[in-house]
Amino acid sequence: MSQNYKFKSLEIAKASQKKEIDETKNDGFKTYEIGESKTIDFVLLDGTRQNFPYSHYLTSWLGVENEERVIKIFFATHMVTVKGFCLDQLYNRILKQELKRISANKIRYEITRNDNTYITNIVIQWKGSVSEKK
């Protein structure tokens, strides 16, 4: 005789995977990915990738520049600027340190500016170059 066991940990894992898939849908584009991670990975338009540990995260800022929403994320050694539309949800996920990956997409693929997060550009600067310009 065999018995069927239900493991709560497996159910939680399946639920979080489904939530992760639902959260990253954006008309076929993955703009960001959530999940447990000690680092955040940035994917630039040209495919270049760079990650930073959340332990180096200092602060972030959400605002508007040239009619585009902007998030500036300050790490111990770098500043990352994320530009796009509807970035409020992304900003809240940064505060909770839930993001695993943020990807920029070409603006020509932007379908509509509805309530979906859409990232048009990511710029990574070494903080030494930011302070030298002042």
Image (cartoon, rainbow, N blue to C red):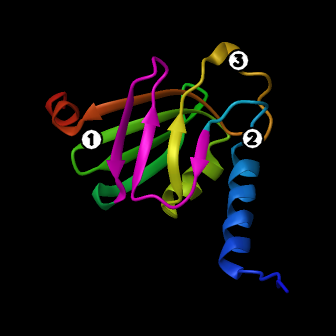
**Circle 2: residue type:** Lys
Q: In the image, which is nearer the foreground, mark 2 or mark 3? A: 2
Query: Callout 1, which amino acid?
Result: His
Coordinates of residue 43 in the picture (x, y in percent): 46, 31
Q: Which disc is residue 25 wearing?
A: 2
Q: Residue at x 45, y 58 (%)?
A: 37
Residue ID for mark 1 = 78
The residue located at (64%, 17%) in the rendering is 107
Q: Mark 2 and 3 residues: CB-CB less than 8 Å, in contact?
A: no
Q: Residues within 10 Å of mark 3 (few under 14, many from 20)?
A: few
Among numbered discs 3 and 1, the one appearing first in the sequence: 1
Magenta segment: 32-54
Label 1, residues with CA under 10 Å away: few <14, some 14-19, many ≥20:
some
53 vs 120: above or below: below
Up the image or down, 77 lies above or below 28; here it is below
In front here: 124 or 70? 124
Can you say which quadrant of the picture contains the C terminus? top left
Whether 13 is among the magenta residues is no
Q: Which mark is residue 109?
A: 3
Of helix, strand and loop, which one carries label 1?
Answer: strand
Nearer to me, 71 or 26 = 26
Q: Between marks 3 and 1, how big is the CA–CA gap? A: 29 Å
Q: Please identify the residue farthest to the right as the structure is shown.
A: 1
- Foreground label between 3 and 1: 3
Which quadrant holds the N terminus?
bottom right
Q: Position of residue 65 (x, y in %)?
A: 52, 31
* Residue 3 image offset from top left, x and y in percent: 82, 85
User: In this image, 75 relative to 5: left or right?
Assistant: left
